[in-house]
Image: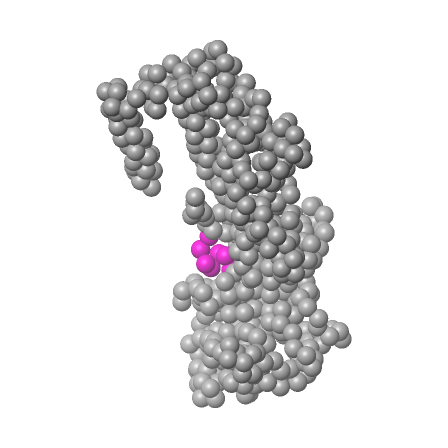
Amino acid sequence: MLELIHVSKSFRSADGAVVPAVDDISMTISEKEFVSIVGPSGCGKTTLLRMIAGLETSAGSHIVFNGHPVHGPDRERGMVFQNFALFPWMTVEENIGSGLRFAGKSDAETQDIVSRYLKLTGLEKFATAYPMTLSGGMKQRVAIARTLASDPQIILMDEPFGALDTQTRSQMQEFLADLWVKDSKTVIFVTHDIEEAIFLSDRVFLMSPRPGQIKQEFKIPFGPGRNHELKFSDEFFALKKEIMRMM
Amino acid sequence: MRRSKWASVGLGSLSFAVIFVIWSAVTYTRFVSDVFLPTPSELVHGAVMLFVQRGFLWDIGISALRIIIGFVIAVMLAIPIGIALGLSRRASQLLEPVVDFIRYIPNPALIPLFILWFGVGETEKIIVISQTVFFQLVLMVANSVSFTPKEIIESAQTLGATRWHIITRVIFPYIKPRIYDDLRISIGWAWTALMAAEIVGASSGIGLIIVEAQRLLRTPNVVAGILTIGILGLITDITMKLLYPVFFPWAPKLEHHA
Protein backbone atom coordinates (compact mmCIF):
# COMPACT_ATOMS: atom_id res chain seq x y z
CA MET A 1 0.00 0.00 0.00
CA LEU A 2 2.99 2.28 0.57
CA GLU A 3 6.07 2.26 -1.56
CA LEU A 4 9.20 4.31 -1.13
CA ILE A 5 11.34 4.31 -4.27
CA HIS A 6 14.84 5.75 -3.92
CA VAL A 7 13.75 8.43 -1.45
CA SER A 8 16.36 11.07 -0.63
CA LYS A 9 16.33 14.41 1.10
CA SER A 10 18.99 16.90 2.00
CA PHE A 11 18.98 20.14 3.93
CA ARG A 12 21.05 23.21 3.49
CA SER A 13 22.86 24.05 6.70
CA ALA A 14 23.42 27.58 8.00
CA ASP A 15 26.83 27.87 6.30
CA GLY A 16 25.35 26.80 2.97
CA ALA A 17 26.63 23.24 2.90
CA VAL A 18 24.29 20.51 1.68
CA VAL A 19 23.66 17.94 4.40
CA PRO A 20 22.02 14.70 3.31
CA ALA A 21 19.35 13.62 5.80
CA VAL A 22 17.78 10.69 4.01
CA ASP A 23 19.72 8.84 1.36
CA ASP A 24 18.25 6.52 -1.22
CA ILE A 25 15.73 4.63 0.87
CA SER A 26 13.42 2.10 -0.72
CA MET A 27 10.84 -0.03 1.09
CA THR A 28 7.41 -1.48 0.64
CA ILE A 29 4.84 -1.63 3.41
CA SER A 30 1.73 -3.69 3.11
CA GLU A 31 -1.70 -3.31 4.61
CA LYS A 32 -2.19 -3.90 8.37
CA GLU A 33 1.53 -4.10 8.87
CA PHE A 34 3.17 -2.54 11.93
CA VAL A 35 6.61 -1.35 10.92
CA SER A 36 9.18 0.43 13.06
CA ILE A 37 12.09 2.55 11.99
CA VAL A 38 14.83 2.71 14.60
CA GLY A 39 18.10 4.54 14.66
CA PRO A 40 20.09 7.01 16.68
CA SER A 41 18.91 10.59 16.86
CA GLY A 42 19.76 12.62 13.80
CA CYS A 43 19.66 9.58 11.49
CA GLY A 44 16.83 11.06 9.42
CA LYS A 45 14.06 8.75 10.60
CA THR A 46 11.75 11.60 11.51
CA THR A 47 12.48 13.33 8.22
CA LEU A 48 11.58 10.12 6.39
CA LEU A 49 8.30 9.88 8.31
CA ARG A 50 7.48 13.51 7.61
CA MET A 51 8.10 12.91 3.92
CA ILE A 52 5.63 10.04 3.97
CA ALA A 53 3.14 12.34 5.73
CA GLY A 54 3.70 14.94 3.03
CA LEU A 55 5.01 17.52 5.50
CA GLU A 56 8.45 17.53 3.82
CA THR A 57 9.02 17.45 0.11
CA SER A 58 11.97 16.54 -1.98
CA ALA A 59 12.31 16.74 -5.73
CA GLY A 60 12.93 13.46 -7.44
CA SER A 61 11.74 11.31 -4.57
CA HIS A 62 9.00 8.84 -5.15
CA ILE A 63 6.61 7.98 -2.41
CA VAL A 64 3.64 6.10 -3.76
CA PHE A 65 0.61 5.59 -1.58
CA ASN A 66 -2.18 3.38 -2.89
CA GLY A 67 -0.96 3.94 -6.43
CA HIS A 68 -0.77 7.75 -6.13
CA PRO A 69 2.34 9.84 -5.54
CA VAL A 70 2.31 11.75 -2.25
CA HIS A 71 1.85 15.51 -2.60
CA GLY A 72 1.36 17.27 0.69
CA PRO A 73 -0.41 16.15 3.85
CA ASP A 74 -3.70 14.31 3.68
CA ARG A 75 -6.14 12.70 6.09
CA GLU A 76 -5.34 9.29 4.58
CA ARG A 77 -1.95 9.52 6.28
CA GLY A 78 -2.55 10.35 9.92
CA MET A 79 0.29 11.42 12.14
CA VAL A 80 0.94 11.22 15.87
CA PHE A 81 3.55 13.70 17.07
CA GLN A 82 6.05 13.36 19.88
CA ASN A 83 4.74 16.47 21.62
CA PHE A 84 1.10 15.46 21.15
CA ALA A 85 0.22 18.61 19.14
CA LEU A 86 -3.29 18.67 20.58
CA PHE A 87 -5.59 21.63 20.04
CA PRO A 88 -5.47 23.27 23.49
CA TRP A 89 -8.76 25.18 23.09
CA MET A 90 -10.68 21.97 22.45
CA THR A 91 -11.80 19.49 25.08
CA VAL A 92 -10.70 15.87 24.81
CA GLU A 93 -13.83 14.88 22.88
CA GLU A 94 -13.57 17.90 20.59
CA ASN A 95 -9.94 17.03 19.89
CA ILE A 96 -10.87 13.47 19.01
CA GLY A 97 -13.67 14.67 16.76
CA SER A 98 -11.65 17.41 15.06
CA GLY A 99 -10.59 15.36 12.04
CA LEU A 100 -14.19 14.30 11.47
CA ARG A 101 -15.31 17.93 11.61
CA PHE A 102 -12.64 18.98 9.12
CA ALA A 103 -14.06 16.27 6.86
CA GLY A 104 -17.53 17.78 7.27
CA LYS A 105 -19.09 14.81 9.07
CA SER A 106 -22.44 15.40 10.77
CA ASP A 107 -22.69 16.03 14.52
CA ALA A 108 -24.44 12.72 15.11
CA GLU A 109 -21.84 10.72 13.23
CA THR A 110 -18.99 12.59 14.90
CA GLN A 111 -20.50 12.03 18.34
CA ASP A 112 -20.88 8.36 17.59
CA ILE A 113 -17.29 7.83 16.50
CA VAL A 114 -15.90 10.03 19.27
CA SER A 115 -17.65 8.06 22.00
CA ARG A 116 -16.35 4.82 20.50
CA TYR A 117 -12.78 6.08 20.67
CA LEU A 118 -13.23 7.58 24.12
CA LYS A 119 -14.17 4.12 25.31
CA LEU A 120 -11.46 2.34 23.35
CA THR A 121 -8.76 4.58 24.80
CA GLY A 122 -10.22 4.71 28.33
CA LEU A 123 -10.75 8.46 28.18
CA GLU A 124 -14.49 8.57 28.91
CA LYS A 125 -14.03 10.26 32.25
CA PHE A 126 -11.93 12.99 30.66
CA ALA A 127 -14.22 13.73 27.72
CA THR A 128 -14.82 17.36 28.71
CA ALA A 129 -11.35 18.09 30.11
CA TYR A 130 -8.92 20.42 28.39
CA PRO A 131 -5.53 19.01 27.33
CA MET A 132 -3.61 21.26 29.73
CA THR A 133 -5.14 19.40 32.67
CA LEU A 134 -3.99 15.96 31.46
CA SER A 135 -0.78 14.02 32.08
CA GLY A 136 1.61 13.28 29.22
CA GLY A 137 0.36 9.71 28.81
CA MET A 138 -3.25 10.89 28.69
CA LYS A 139 -2.43 13.55 26.15
CA GLN A 140 -0.83 11.00 23.89
CA ARG A 141 -3.89 8.76 24.20
CA VAL A 142 -6.00 11.68 23.05
CA ALA A 143 -3.65 12.30 20.13
CA ILE A 144 -3.79 8.63 19.12
CA ALA A 145 -7.58 8.56 19.47
CA ARG A 146 -7.83 11.74 17.41
CA THR A 147 -5.78 10.21 14.61
CA LEU A 148 -7.65 6.89 14.74
CA ALA A 149 -11.05 8.61 14.76
CA SER A 150 -10.49 10.26 11.42
CA ASP A 151 -9.86 6.77 10.06
CA PRO A 152 -6.64 7.19 8.08
CA GLN A 153 -5.35 4.32 5.98
CA ILE A 154 -1.95 4.54 7.58
CA ILE A 155 -0.80 5.95 10.92
CA LEU A 156 2.60 7.57 11.17
CA MET A 157 3.96 7.82 14.68
CA ASP A 158 6.94 10.03 15.40
CA GLU A 159 8.47 8.91 18.72
CA PRO A 160 5.02 9.14 20.28
CA PHE A 161 6.22 7.93 23.67
CA GLY A 162 9.51 9.82 23.66
CA ALA A 163 8.25 12.56 25.97
CA LEU A 164 6.91 10.13 28.58
CA ASP A 165 8.53 8.68 31.69
CA THR A 166 9.64 5.03 31.64
CA GLN A 167 6.64 3.61 33.44
CA THR A 168 4.04 5.51 31.44
CA ARG A 169 5.98 4.60 28.36
CA SER A 170 5.68 0.86 28.88
CA GLN A 171 2.01 1.23 29.79
CA MET A 172 1.47 3.09 26.55
CA GLN A 173 3.32 0.40 24.59
CA GLU A 174 0.95 -2.22 25.94
CA PHE A 175 -1.97 0.08 25.31
CA LEU A 176 -0.92 0.47 21.68
CA ALA A 177 -0.25 -3.27 21.21
CA ASP A 178 -3.68 -3.95 22.66
CA LEU A 179 -5.35 -1.27 20.56
CA TRP A 180 -3.74 -2.64 17.47
CA VAL A 181 -5.33 -6.04 18.10
CA LYS A 182 -8.78 -4.40 18.44
CA ASP A 183 -8.49 -1.92 15.60
CA SER A 184 -5.84 -3.12 13.20
CA LYS A 185 -4.19 -0.42 11.11
CA THR A 186 -1.10 0.02 9.03
CA VAL A 187 1.43 1.77 11.24
CA ILE A 188 4.88 3.22 10.72
CA PHE A 189 6.45 3.84 14.09
CA VAL A 190 9.61 5.87 14.51
CA THR A 191 11.62 5.43 17.70
CA HIS A 192 15.15 5.29 18.99
CA ASP A 193 14.14 2.62 21.51
CA ILE A 194 14.94 -0.83 20.08
CA GLU A 195 12.97 -2.66 22.75
CA GLU A 196 9.89 -0.62 21.96
CA ALA A 197 10.29 -1.29 18.25
CA ILE A 198 10.59 -5.08 18.73
CA PHE A 199 7.70 -5.17 21.19
CA LEU A 200 5.29 -3.46 18.81
CA SER A 201 6.32 -4.38 15.29
CA ASP A 202 6.07 -6.96 12.56
CA ARG A 203 9.18 -5.60 10.96
CA VAL A 204 11.94 -3.31 12.18
CA PHE A 205 14.12 -1.21 9.90
CA LEU A 206 17.43 -0.09 11.32
CA MET A 207 18.70 3.24 10.01
CA SER A 208 22.26 4.48 10.06
CA PRO A 209 23.04 8.18 10.38
CA ARG A 210 24.64 10.63 7.96
CA PRO A 211 23.52 9.92 5.41
CA GLY A 212 20.33 8.23 6.63
CA GLN A 213 20.18 4.83 5.02
CA ILE A 214 18.46 1.56 5.83
CA LYS A 215 21.14 -0.64 7.27
CA GLN A 216 19.12 -3.76 7.84
CA GLU A 217 15.61 -5.10 8.07
CA PHE A 218 14.49 -7.48 10.82
CA LYS A 219 11.40 -9.65 10.84
CA ILE A 220 9.80 -9.92 14.27
CA PRO A 221 8.35 -13.41 14.79
CA PHE A 222 5.93 -12.64 17.65
CA GLY A 223 2.21 -12.73 16.95
CA PRO A 224 -0.53 -10.39 18.06
CA GLY A 225 -1.71 -9.99 21.67
CA ARG A 226 1.70 -9.23 23.14
CA ASN A 227 2.14 -8.20 26.73
CA HIS A 228 4.98 -7.00 28.83
CA GLU A 229 6.20 -10.46 29.81
CA LEU A 230 7.48 -10.82 26.25
CA LYS A 231 10.28 -8.41 26.99
CA PHE A 232 11.82 -10.92 29.41
CA SER A 233 11.82 -13.87 27.01
CA ASP A 234 15.06 -15.25 25.60
CA GLU A 235 13.87 -14.85 22.06
CA PHE A 236 13.14 -11.16 22.61
CA PHE A 237 16.48 -10.66 24.25
CA ALA A 238 18.34 -12.40 21.44
CA LEU A 239 16.64 -10.16 18.86
CA LYS A 240 17.46 -7.07 20.82
CA LYS A 241 21.10 -8.11 21.04
CA GLU A 242 21.23 -8.79 17.32
CA ILE A 243 19.88 -5.33 16.45
CA MET A 244 22.05 -3.59 19.02
CA ARG A 245 25.13 -5.18 17.49
CA MET A 246 24.25 -3.79 14.10
CA MET A 247 23.96 -0.22 15.34
CA MET B 1 -1.99 31.78 45.06
CA ARG B 2 -4.79 33.32 47.05
CA ARG B 3 -2.41 35.05 49.40
CA SER B 4 -0.27 36.51 46.62
CA LYS B 5 -3.42 37.86 44.97
CA TRP B 6 -4.41 39.72 48.12
CA ALA B 7 -0.84 40.88 48.53
CA SER B 8 -0.91 42.38 45.04
CA VAL B 9 -4.24 44.10 45.73
CA GLY B 10 -2.80 45.41 48.99
CA LEU B 11 0.34 46.73 47.34
CA GLY B 12 -1.70 48.32 44.55
CA SER B 13 -3.89 50.11 47.08
CA LEU B 14 -0.84 51.15 49.05
CA SER B 15 0.54 53.18 46.17
CA PHE B 16 -2.80 54.98 45.86
CA ALA B 17 -2.81 55.60 49.61
CA VAL B 18 0.67 57.11 49.52
CA ILE B 19 -0.30 59.43 46.67
CA PHE B 20 -3.45 60.44 48.58
CA VAL B 21 -1.49 61.27 51.73
CA ILE B 22 1.10 63.37 49.88
CA TRP B 23 -1.64 65.10 47.91
CA SER B 24 -3.60 65.96 51.07
CA ALA B 25 -0.46 67.19 52.78
CA VAL B 26 0.59 69.58 50.03
CA THR B 27 -2.91 70.97 49.33
CA TYR B 28 -4.51 71.34 52.78
CA THR B 29 -1.42 73.19 53.98
CA ARG B 30 -1.67 75.40 50.87
CA PHE B 31 1.89 74.46 50.13
CA VAL B 32 0.55 74.13 46.57
CA SER B 33 -1.98 76.78 45.50
CA ASP B 34 -5.53 75.60 44.80
CA VAL B 35 -5.22 77.07 41.32
CA PHE B 36 -2.76 74.28 40.53
CA LEU B 37 -4.15 71.44 42.60
CA PRO B 38 -7.42 71.22 44.58
CA THR B 39 -7.64 69.59 48.00
CA PRO B 40 -9.42 66.20 48.10
CA SER B 41 -12.58 67.84 49.47
CA GLU B 42 -12.55 70.55 46.78
CA LEU B 43 -12.12 67.81 44.23
CA VAL B 44 -15.11 65.86 45.55
CA HIS B 45 -17.17 69.05 45.61
CA GLY B 46 -16.11 69.88 42.06
CA ALA B 47 -16.94 66.37 40.86
CA VAL B 48 -20.38 66.46 42.47
CA MET B 49 -21.11 69.85 40.92
CA LEU B 50 -20.02 68.50 37.53
CA PHE B 51 -22.56 65.69 37.76
CA VAL B 52 -25.34 67.79 39.28
CA GLN B 53 -25.00 71.08 37.42
CA ARG B 54 -23.08 70.35 34.28
CA GLY B 55 -24.65 66.98 33.37
CA PHE B 56 -21.28 65.24 33.37
CA LEU B 57 -22.84 61.79 33.09
CA TRP B 58 -24.09 62.70 29.63
CA ASP B 59 -20.57 63.66 28.55
CA ILE B 60 -19.14 60.46 30.00
CA GLY B 61 -21.77 58.52 28.07
CA ILE B 62 -20.96 60.38 24.84
CA SER B 63 -17.24 59.74 25.24
CA ALA B 64 -17.78 56.09 26.08
CA LEU B 65 -20.04 55.64 23.08
CA ARG B 66 -17.44 57.20 20.79
CA ILE B 67 -14.84 54.84 22.22
CA ILE B 68 -17.03 51.79 21.74
CA ILE B 69 -17.98 52.61 18.15
CA GLY B 70 -14.50 53.66 17.12
CA PHE B 71 -12.95 50.67 18.85
CA VAL B 72 -15.34 48.13 17.35
CA ILE B 73 -14.70 49.45 13.85
CA ALA B 74 -10.94 49.29 14.38
CA VAL B 75 -11.11 45.76 15.79
CA MET B 76 -13.31 44.47 12.99
CA LEU B 77 -10.78 45.71 10.45
CA ALA B 78 -7.61 44.96 12.38
CA ILE B 79 -8.30 41.30 13.17
CA PRO B 80 -8.81 40.00 9.61
CA ILE B 81 -6.16 42.29 8.13
CA GLY B 82 -3.75 41.49 10.95
CA ILE B 83 -4.24 37.77 10.42
CA ALA B 84 -3.69 38.20 6.69
CA LEU B 85 -0.48 40.13 7.38
CA GLY B 86 0.65 37.45 9.81
CA LEU B 87 -0.03 34.67 7.32
CA SER B 88 1.32 36.10 4.12
CA ARG B 89 4.84 37.33 3.84
CA ARG B 90 3.99 39.17 0.64
CA ALA B 91 1.08 40.99 2.25
CA SER B 92 3.25 42.06 5.15
CA GLN B 93 6.06 43.19 2.86
CA LEU B 94 3.47 45.22 0.95
CA LEU B 95 1.66 46.82 3.87
CA GLU B 96 3.92 46.84 6.88
CA PRO B 97 6.05 49.86 5.92
CA VAL B 98 2.90 51.95 5.38
CA VAL B 99 1.38 50.76 8.64
CA ASP B 100 4.59 51.52 10.50
CA PHE B 101 4.81 54.95 8.94
CA ILE B 102 1.29 55.91 9.96
CA ARG B 103 1.67 54.27 13.36
CA TYR B 104 4.57 56.57 14.17
CA ILE B 105 2.70 59.77 13.40
CA PRO B 106 1.42 61.07 16.78
CA ASN B 107 -2.28 61.20 16.52
CA PRO B 108 -2.77 64.86 17.56
CA ALA B 109 -0.77 65.76 14.44
CA LEU B 110 -3.42 64.13 12.27
CA ILE B 111 -6.44 65.67 13.96
CA PRO B 112 -6.28 69.03 12.11
CA LEU B 113 -6.29 67.14 8.84
CA PHE B 114 -9.22 64.97 9.91
CA ILE B 115 -11.12 68.12 10.94
CA LEU B 116 -10.51 69.55 7.48
CA TRP B 117 -11.82 66.37 5.92
CA PHE B 118 -14.67 65.42 8.22
CA GLY B 119 -15.46 68.52 10.31
CA VAL B 120 -15.66 68.42 14.10
CA GLY B 121 -18.65 66.11 14.38
CA GLU B 122 -18.98 62.49 15.47
CA THR B 123 -17.49 61.11 12.24
CA GLU B 124 -14.20 62.82 12.93
CA LYS B 125 -14.08 61.59 16.56
CA ILE B 126 -14.77 58.02 15.57
CA ILE B 127 -12.27 58.11 12.71
CA VAL B 128 -9.58 59.48 15.02
CA ILE B 129 -10.19 56.59 17.45
CA SER B 130 -10.44 53.90 14.77
CA GLN B 131 -7.38 55.15 12.96
CA THR B 132 -5.22 55.19 16.09
CA VAL B 133 -6.36 51.80 17.36
CA PHE B 134 -6.29 50.14 13.95
CA PHE B 135 -2.68 50.94 13.13
CA GLN B 136 -1.45 49.79 16.54
CA LEU B 137 -3.63 46.71 16.75
CA VAL B 138 -3.08 45.37 13.26
CA LEU B 139 0.61 44.74 13.86
CA MET B 140 -0.04 43.17 17.25
CA VAL B 141 -2.52 40.76 15.67
CA ALA B 142 -0.07 39.98 12.86
CA ASN B 143 2.57 39.25 15.46
CA SER B 144 0.20 37.04 17.45
CA VAL B 145 -0.36 34.85 14.39
CA SER B 146 3.30 33.85 14.46
CA PHE B 147 2.84 32.31 17.90
CA THR B 148 0.83 29.40 16.52
CA PRO B 149 3.06 26.32 16.89
CA LYS B 150 3.99 24.70 13.60
CA GLU B 151 3.11 21.29 15.02
CA ILE B 152 -0.49 22.25 15.67
CA ILE B 153 -0.88 23.37 12.09
CA GLU B 154 0.80 20.21 10.81
CA SER B 155 -1.36 17.95 12.93
CA ALA B 156 -4.45 19.70 11.55
CA GLN B 157 -3.13 19.15 8.02
CA THR B 158 -2.69 15.43 8.60
CA LEU B 159 -6.24 15.36 9.97
CA GLY B 160 -7.49 16.69 6.65
CA ALA B 161 -7.82 20.41 7.38
CA THR B 162 -7.93 22.69 4.35
CA ARG B 163 -6.05 25.98 4.27
CA TRP B 164 -9.24 27.81 5.19
CA HIS B 165 -9.81 25.42 8.12
CA ILE B 166 -6.27 26.11 9.28
CA ILE B 167 -6.93 29.85 9.37
CA THR B 168 -10.42 29.86 10.83
CA ARG B 169 -10.45 26.74 12.98
CA VAL B 170 -6.82 26.42 14.06
CA ILE B 171 -4.86 29.66 13.99
CA PHE B 172 -7.71 31.98 14.97
CA PRO B 173 -8.91 29.99 17.99
CA TYR B 174 -5.33 29.41 19.08
CA ILE B 175 -4.41 33.10 19.08
CA LYS B 176 -7.74 34.37 20.41
CA PRO B 177 -6.44 34.85 23.99
CA ARG B 178 -3.51 36.84 22.62
CA ILE B 179 -5.79 38.98 20.50
CA TYR B 180 -7.99 39.53 23.54
CA ASP B 181 -4.95 40.79 25.41
CA ASP B 182 -4.01 42.98 22.44
CA LEU B 183 -7.50 44.49 22.64
CA ARG B 184 -7.13 45.16 26.33
CA ILE B 185 -3.94 47.10 25.70
CA SER B 186 -5.17 48.99 22.66
CA ILE B 187 -8.33 50.28 24.34
CA GLY B 188 -6.01 52.62 26.23
CA TRP B 189 -4.95 54.22 22.96
CA ALA B 190 -8.59 54.74 22.11
CA TRP B 191 -8.90 56.98 25.17
CA THR B 192 -5.72 58.86 24.31
CA ALA B 193 -6.97 59.48 20.80
CA LEU B 194 -10.41 60.55 21.94
CA MET B 195 -9.09 63.03 24.47
CA ALA B 196 -6.90 64.64 21.84
CA ALA B 197 -9.89 64.90 19.51
CA GLU B 198 -12.24 66.24 22.17
CA ILE B 199 -9.77 68.79 23.42
CA VAL B 200 -9.03 70.12 19.94
CA GLY B 201 -12.68 70.54 19.06
CA ALA B 202 -15.89 69.11 20.45
CA SER B 203 -19.26 70.19 21.74
CA SER B 204 -19.55 67.35 24.27
CA GLY B 205 -17.51 64.69 26.01
CA ILE B 206 -15.08 64.38 28.90
CA GLY B 207 -12.33 66.15 26.96
CA LEU B 208 -14.55 69.18 26.40
CA ILE B 209 -15.42 69.34 30.10
CA ILE B 210 -11.72 69.33 30.93
CA VAL B 211 -10.72 72.17 28.57
CA GLU B 212 -13.82 74.14 29.49
CA ALA B 213 -12.96 73.95 33.19
CA GLN B 214 -9.37 74.83 32.43
CA ARG B 215 -10.42 78.03 30.62
CA LEU B 216 -12.50 79.02 33.66
CA LEU B 217 -9.64 78.09 36.03
CA ARG B 218 -11.87 75.50 37.69
CA THR B 219 -9.01 73.18 38.62
CA PRO B 220 -11.15 70.74 40.67
CA ASN B 221 -13.25 70.07 37.58
CA VAL B 222 -10.15 69.57 35.44
CA VAL B 223 -8.81 67.01 37.89
CA ALA B 224 -12.21 65.36 38.26
CA GLY B 225 -12.37 64.94 34.47
CA ILE B 226 -8.89 63.43 34.35
CA LEU B 227 -9.61 61.07 37.22
CA THR B 228 -12.82 59.94 35.54
CA ILE B 229 -10.84 58.74 32.54
CA GLY B 230 -8.38 56.96 34.80
CA ILE B 231 -11.15 55.25 36.73
CA LEU B 232 -12.96 54.18 33.55
CA GLY B 233 -9.69 52.82 32.18
CA LEU B 234 -8.94 50.93 35.37
CA ILE B 235 -12.43 49.41 35.47
CA THR B 236 -12.17 48.30 31.84
CA ASP B 237 -8.75 46.78 32.40
CA ILE B 238 -9.68 44.92 35.57
CA THR B 239 -12.92 43.64 34.05
CA MET B 240 -11.11 42.34 30.98
CA LYS B 241 -8.45 40.65 33.09
CA LEU B 242 -11.10 39.02 35.28
CA LEU B 243 -13.00 37.78 32.25
CA TYR B 244 -9.91 36.23 30.62
CA PRO B 245 -10.18 32.87 32.42
CA VAL B 246 -13.94 32.89 31.80
CA PHE B 247 -13.46 33.28 28.05
CA PHE B 248 -10.38 31.08 27.81
CA PRO B 249 -10.55 28.35 30.44
CA TRP B 250 -8.13 26.27 28.36
CA ALA B 251 -5.38 28.84 28.08
CA PRO B 252 -2.44 29.25 30.39
CA LYS B 253 -2.35 32.65 32.04
CA LEU B 254 -0.77 35.14 29.69
CA GLU B 255 2.04 37.31 30.87
CA HIS B 256 0.17 40.59 30.89
CA HIS B 257 2.65 42.76 29.11
CA ALA B 258 1.15 46.19 29.73
Q: Nearer the viewer, residue A13 or A198?
A: A13
Examine the rendered structure and indicate whether residue A169 appears above or below residue B85.
below
Q: Residue furthest right?
A: A67
**B121 with respect to A85 (left or right):** right
Residue A138: in magenta span: yes
Q: Residue at x 26, y 20 (%)?
A: B30
Q: Position of residue A63 (x, y in %)?
A: 69, 77
Q: Nearer the viewer, residue B88 or B125?
A: B125
**B20 with respect to B130 (left or right):** left
Q: Residue at x 66, y 85 (%)?
A: A6
Q: Which of the image's four quarters has the N terminus of chain A?
A: bottom right
* Residue A176 image-quadrant placement: bottom right
Examine the rendered structure and indicate whether residue A16 appears above or below residue B197.
below
- Determine the main secondary structure of the stretch shown in magenta: helix
* Residue A31 image-quadrant placement: bottom right
Q: Position of residue A11 (x, y in %)?
A: 57, 78
Q: Position of residue B11 (x, y in %)?
A: 29, 36
Q: Nearer the viewer, residue B246 or A93?
A: B246
**B65 with respect to B241 (left or right):** right
Residue A201: tell me if it is visible: no
Residue B220: tell me if it is visible: yes
The segment highlighted magenta reads A134-144
Q: Residue at x 48, y 11 (%)?
A: B53
Q: Nearer the viewer, residue A217 or A101?
A: A101
Q: Position of residue B157 (x, y in %)?
A: 64, 61
Residue B82: in magenta span: no
